[in-house]
């Protein structure tokens, strides 16, 4: 244990670390070994109140700055993040267990992309001029106020920045509650934002479990809640926010289809299926975990997939040669093992994997089931682990209907050399983030989010601005007012 993972204190409020040991202890467990590497405390009512008060007090002055001034601070933070990419990636690995090979390119870098992108947009957030004959109206894009961000545990740095960047660019302030499973990374982002020049109170971090999140969601000082989490939590948070008429963004779970047609380039399709099922040990919301493969190429696909999976390097996440790490927690490990047992019990054919690795950490082998049918539990429920379900199909209309037969609607992918078919099929799939001959790309320039139970609103791209600002309309009469009496 050489890396100093114990943060200065549990929370970050008003530009400073804050501790209150009266809050419940939250152990931070390194998933590769099961060791406790740090301890933070859940925010007490006093801490939550302090954070919200700081965000509320800071917001008017932050919104009164020009967009370009706010943008400059976000851009500076992006630059600092890039300079410290290695250390931030190591911290992300300790927090989540994801291999350093991944975190070096996908976490702090994605956070920096978001800060840079929205930093660049901040100076051009304008309204419009609406001519109305002699009169006219104009709109002003205004901040919402205090926003609450609540994170999941799979991408702690990225989630904090995907929420903070558009929120802060629009002149809002934020209180962010990381997942209790991965509390460390957001604190570093808060420190860096202060260092980049964000005034105290603009971005605050409060630790805690669901109760702390619930307390933040219902506070009257809060204008908007953005959650990344599971569908059941999303429903609870959405209804709590609705009862106070707050804005929401809900980035929730999925059970996304990945359709491989008979004319697909098999190696590319296998590569897409690997990225869409085993990256981050399968702990990615948009994963294409229902892989529909045309019967004509199914065995060829499975053979190639099993061969390629032998190339996965499972082991110490700190070793840059490792490409497959542990589950984030023992609880997640148990959940995934439970699904593997159900897959076997319900008659799916185990192609590869299926076992826990006895390493002391929370490792499960990359697992593939074939001959999966639509009714099986592993084809219906989000597993959030390295378990791929391969289903057969023969007909385009049939596979579209089956792909859409789910309450989820986060992502969908199609592999085919026939581009007319690719666009036709994607056009009929009920999903927010889709891929043609690719899987799981999430550049900040493109909107990301789900339909149906997978969410409300969009993160990233210009679309996110709509979700962190509101329009004020001003009607201007140029002549006299004609009143009836
Ligand atoms: N769509 C996306 O962008 C996206 C990205 C990553 C993860 N996810 C989803 O997240 C889930 C995995 O993450 P998780 O297990 O941390 O999710 P979770 O729903 O258990 O928790 C998410 C967050 O909500 C908080 N929370 C729980 N109850 C709450 C309540 N009543 N009020 C306010 N906050 C509350 C938790 O403390 C945590 O910070 C998966 O379903 C995955 O698909 C979605």
Image (spheres, helix red, strand yellow):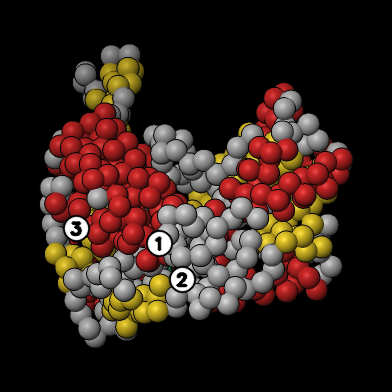
Quarter of the picture containing the N terminus is bottom left
For label 2, the residue is 32
Please give the label number shown on residue 191. Answer: 3
Task: Determine contact: label 3, label 2, CB under 8 Å.
Answer: no
Distance from Cα at disc 3 to Cα at disc 2: 27 Å
Q: For mark 2, does the 10 Å Cα neighbourhood hold few (<14), some (14 to 19), or many (20 or more) residues? A: many
Which one is closest to the eye, mark 3 or mark 1? 1
Q: Position of residue 266 (x, y in %)?
A: 73, 38
Which one is closest to the eye, mark 1 or mark 2? 1
Q: Is mark 3 within 8 Å of ligand 1?
A: no
The mark that comes first in sequence, 1 or 2, is: 2
Distance from Cα at disc 3 to Cα at disc 1: 24 Å
Q: Residue at x 15, y 53 (%)?
A: 194
At mark 1, the secondary structure is: loop
The mark that comes first in sequence, 3 or 2, is: 2
Quarter of the picture containing the C terminus is top left
The mark that comes first in sequence, 3 or 1, is: 3
Q: Residue at x 58, y 48 (%)?
A: 275
Distance from Cα at disc 1 to Cα at disc 2: 9 Å
Q: Position of residue 365 (x, y in %)?
A: 63, 65
Please give the label number shown on residue 13. Answer: none
For label 1, the residue is 318
Q: For mark 1, does the 10 Å Cα neighbourhood hold few (<14), some (14 to 19), or many (20 or more) residues? A: some
Q: Position of residue 314 (x, y in %)?
A: 55, 62
Which one is closest to the eye, mark 3 or mark 2? 2
Whether residue 312 is visible, yes or no, is yes
Q: Residue at x 41, y 39 (%)?
A: 444
At mark 2, the secondary structure is: loop
Q: Is residue 315 left or right of residue 402?
A: left
Front residue of 189 and 225: 189
Task: Determine contact: label 1, label 2, CB under 8 Å.
Answer: yes
Q: Quadrant of residue 283?
A: bottom right
């Amino acid at each position: 244990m050489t890396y100093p993972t114990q943060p200065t204190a549990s929370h970050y409020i008003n530009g400073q670390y804050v501790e209150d040991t009266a809050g419940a202890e939250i152990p931070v467990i390194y998933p590769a070994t099961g060791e406790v590497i740090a301890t933070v405390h859940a925010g007490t009512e006093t801490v939550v109140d302090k954070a919200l008060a700081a965000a509320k007090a800071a917001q008017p002055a932050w919104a009164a700055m020009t967009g370009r001034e706010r943008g400059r601070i976000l851009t500076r933070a992006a630059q600092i993040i890039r300079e410290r990419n290695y250390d931030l990636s190591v911290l992300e690995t300790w927090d989540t267990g994801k291999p350093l090979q991944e975190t070096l390119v996908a976490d702090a870098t994605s956070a920096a992309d978001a800060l840079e992108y929205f930093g660049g947009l901040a100076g051009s957030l304008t309204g419009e001029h609406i001519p109305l004959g002699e009169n006219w109206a104009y709109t002003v894009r205004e901040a919402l106020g205090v926003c609450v961000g609540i994170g999941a545990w799979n991408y702690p740095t990225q989630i904090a920045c995907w929420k903070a960047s558009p929120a802060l660019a629009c002149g809002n302030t934020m209180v962010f509650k990381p997942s209790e499973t991965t509390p460390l990374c957001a604190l570093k982002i808060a420190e860096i934002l202060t260092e980049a020049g964000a005034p105290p109170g603009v971005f605050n971090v409060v630790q805690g479990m669901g109760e702390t999140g619930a307390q933040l969601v219902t506070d009257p000082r809060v204008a908007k809640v953005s959650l990344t989490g599971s569908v059941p939590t999303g429903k609870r948070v959405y209804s709590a926010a609705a009862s106070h008429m707050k804005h929401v963004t809900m980035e929730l779970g999925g059970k996304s289809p990945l359709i491989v047609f008979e004319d697909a380039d098999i190696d590319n399709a296998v590569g897409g299926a690997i990225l869409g099922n085993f990256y981050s040990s399968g702990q990615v919301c948009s994963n294409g975990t229902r892989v529909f493969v045309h019967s004509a190429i199914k065995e060829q696909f499975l053979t190639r997939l099993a061969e390629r999976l032998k190339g996965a390097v499972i082991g110490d996440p700190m070793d840059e040669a490792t490409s497959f790490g542990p589950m984030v927690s023992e609880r997640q490990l148990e959940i995934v093992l439970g699904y593997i047992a159900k897959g076997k019990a319900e008659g799916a054919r185990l192609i590869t994997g299926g076992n826990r690795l006895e390493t002391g950490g929370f490792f499960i082998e990359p697992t593939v089931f074939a001959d999966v049918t639509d009714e099986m539990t592993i084809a219906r429920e989000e597993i959030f682990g390295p378990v791929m379900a391969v289903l057969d199909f023969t007909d385009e209309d049939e596979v579209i209907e089956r792909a859409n037969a789910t309450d989820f609607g986060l992502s969908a992918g199609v592999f085919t050399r026939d581009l007319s078919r690719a666009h036709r099929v994607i056009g009929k799939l009920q999903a927010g983030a889709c891929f043609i001959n690719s899987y799981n790309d999430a550049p900040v320039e493109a909107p990301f989010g789900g339909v149906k139970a997978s969410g409300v609103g969009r993160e990233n791209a210009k679309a996110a601005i709509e979700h962190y600002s509101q329009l004020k309309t001003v009607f201007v009469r140029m002549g006299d007012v004609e009143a009836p009496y």
